[in-house]
Amino acid sequence: MTNILIVDDDRNILELIDTFLSEVGYKVYQAQDGLEALKILRQTNCQLAVVDVMMPYMDGYHLTREIRQNFDIPIILLTSKNQIEDKEQGYLSGTDDYLVKPFEPKELLFRIKALLRRYDKQSDSATVTLGRTIINKKSYEVHIGNVTILLPLKEFELLYFFASNPMQVFSRVQLIEHIWGLDYEGDERTVDVHIKRLRERFSELTDDFQIKTVRGVGYLLEAKK
C-alpha cells in the first residue's frame, strides 16, 4: 500500500483529501504542522507528501526544504496563492509540483499518480545495500561478497521490497498487493512459502539481514547494524 502524507493546518482539507485518497486505495497520514509532519516521516515510510504553504511553526517552503534534504520522496505544494513569485519560491524550495486552492480532488490524484510513476522509474535501477549484501534491481541479482545469486522473480521482488523498507512491518495482504498485484486470486499463504525460501537461501550465506515474523501482524526485515 502506498503511504501519502498530507500536511495542512485546515482540518477540513485534511479530512477531504484523506477520504478521497483512502477510497482509491492509498494509506493517508495527517499532520497539521511541519513539526508533526517530520515526526511522521521519521517513523513511517511515506512515498509522497502533499504540503500546504501557510502553516504555524514551520511554513510549507521550510518543510519542503527539510523533506528534500532528508527524504527521497516527491512533494506537492498546496497554496491559495497563484502568483509567479510564490510558485518560484516553491520550486526553489524543492517541490516537484504545485497546486492552487481551491482544487478538485481528482486533479490532486492525477498529480500524485504522475509523480509516483516518475519516482518509480527513477528507482528501477537502484540498488539496496545491507552490509556486504547488494540487491540490484536493474540486473535482478543479489551479490554477497564474491557470490552472485539469481533468485526467482517473485522471491527477488519480495526481498528487494523488504530491503527497501527495513524495520517496517507488512501484512500478507500488503505484500500480496505490492508483489503479486491487486488482481491476484491465489492463496495469500504463498507469501509464507516465499519467505521460507528466502530464509533458507540466505540463513547460511549472510547475517546482514533477517526476515522476522511479527506474530499476528506480518513480516519485517531487520538489517544488521
Image (cartoon, rainbow, N blue to C red):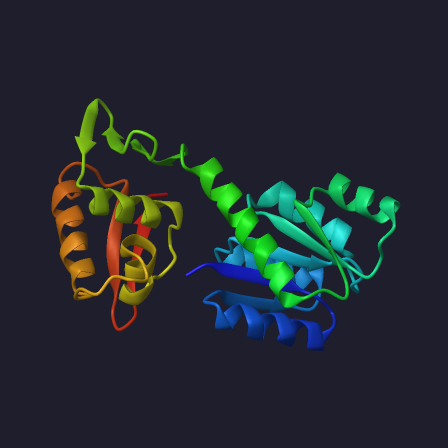
Q: Residue at x 28, y 60 (%)?
A: 176
Res. 94 image quadrant: top right
Q: Extreme top residue here? A: 146
Which residue occupies the foreground of this view, 115 or 152? 115
Q: Is residue 139 above or below residue 74?
A: above
Res. 35 image quadrant: bottom right
Which residue occupies the foreground of this view, 39 or 194? 194
Picture coordinates of residue 174 (x, y %)?
A: 33, 63
Name the quarter where the N terminus is drawn: bottom left
- Left or right for 78, reference 202: right
Picture coordinates of residue 16 (x, y %)?
A: 64, 74
- Left or right for 46, reference 184: right
Q: Is residue 71 above or below residue 24?
A: above
Q: Residue at x 31, y 52 (%)?
A: 221
Picture coordinates of residue 157 (x, y %)?
A: 28, 45
Q: Residue at x 64, y 58 (%)?
A: 50
Name the quarter where the C terminus is drawn: top left
Picture coordinates of residue 87 (x, y %)?
A: 80, 46
